[in-house]
Amino acid sequence: MKKKRSVMHAIAAAPHIFWAILFIILPLIIVIFYAFTDDSGAFSFDNILSLGEYVPIFVLSLELSVIATFICLLIGYPLAYIMARAKPEHQKIFVMLLMLPMWTNLLIRTYSIMAILDDGGLLNTILGTSMHIVGTKGAVIFGMVYDFLPYMVLPIYTCVSKIDKHMWEAASDLGCNTFQVITKVIFPLSMSGVISGVTMVLVPSISTFYISQKLGGGTFELIGDTIERQFVTGAYNVGGAISLVMMILILISIGIMNRFSEEDEGGIIV
């Protein structure tokens, strides 16, 4: 009976194992291969050593992604708190409204932002101004915040909604005002959701390329744009080396998330 169950488990797991090998492990091996070989396929460290010239792009990408993540946290935490404090039927409405933009393709959402922020766009038309927004770092940060805000809100909302309401009442009975309840009780207990949200916003913000291309107007380049350019122009080895560094950054982020997040309080991933 045990042997039969093991065979059934192996059969059930086979499609997932095949998928992981084909679309996760194999691409990683290909990236590592290109990162440590030259155009002739010979082993080489030249691609890794040449990454020094891309340090300013890495720094700019990290700078914009950190700012966008911080803004998402400033907006997302109060929103998640309000959602968690609302009545159950209202919480469902809030979640639906938060997820509604995510049902639209990223490209369409980015073009919509361009239509709003462009020189002759909706914002300038309403304000009667001629502000030049598209093509600036602010526009890219705005696009990151707009596209990735739900990834911050949902994990925090999940954690806050799991906190026992009696703890809120006990803190109030002990003399804490609303601000103290949030900072001394709710925030520490929802830290795993905050870490999850920060990781889920920071990682795609660093690696994004379409948002920076359209809203940046080609005035500057982020690391995602650089990787795309390398592969489009056929410089697979340098592109692989940059991608390898990005993967390491992502693994570090995931390691930090796993270190500080507790399994029973972890956030949800959209």
Image (cartoon, grey):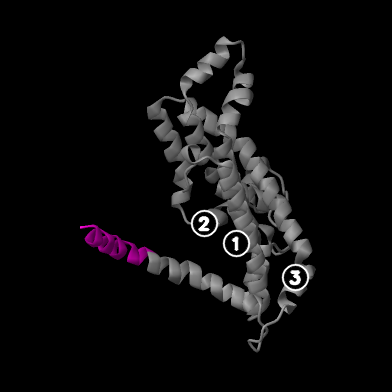
Magenta part mainly helix, strand or loop? helix
Q: Which mark is residue 67?
A: none
The residue under the point 65% across, 53% down is: 118
Instruction: Give the residue type that dot 2 points to.
Output: Leu
**Alpha-carbon span between mark 3 and mark 2:** 30 Å
**Furthest-bottom residue in this view:** 40
Crowdedness near tag 3: few (<14), some (14–19) or many (≥20) residues, C-alpha within 10 Å: some
| Residue where numbered disc 3 is placed | 51
**Alpha-carbon span between mark 1 and mark 2:** 9 Å
**Picture coordinates of residue 22, whole percent (x, y):** 44, 71
Depth-wise, is mark 3 or mark 2 nearer the camera? 3
User: Which stretch is magenta?
Assistant: 1-16
**Furthest-front residue in this view:** 2
Instruction: Give the residue type that dot 3 points to.
Output: Leu
Between 219 and 67, the residue placed more toward the observer is: 67
Q: Secondary structure under badge 2?
A: helix
- Which corner quadrant of the image does residue 14 belong to? bottom left
| Residue where numbered disc 2 is placed | 106
Q: Can see residue 198?
A: yes
**Picture coordinates of residue 215, whole percent (x, y):** 65, 57
Residues under numbered marks 1 and 2 in contact, where contact means CB atoms less than 8 Å apart: yes
The residue under the point 62% across, 78% down is: 34
**Picture coordinates of residue 39, whole percent (x, y):** 66, 86
Q: Give the mark nearest the N terminus, 1 or 2.
A: 2
**Alpha-carbon span between mark 1 and mark 3:** 22 Å
Q: Is residue 123 above or below residue 109?
A: above
**Furthest-left residue in this view:** 1
| Residue where numbered disc 1 is placed | 210
Give the left or right position of residue 68, taking residue 105 as reference.
Answer: right
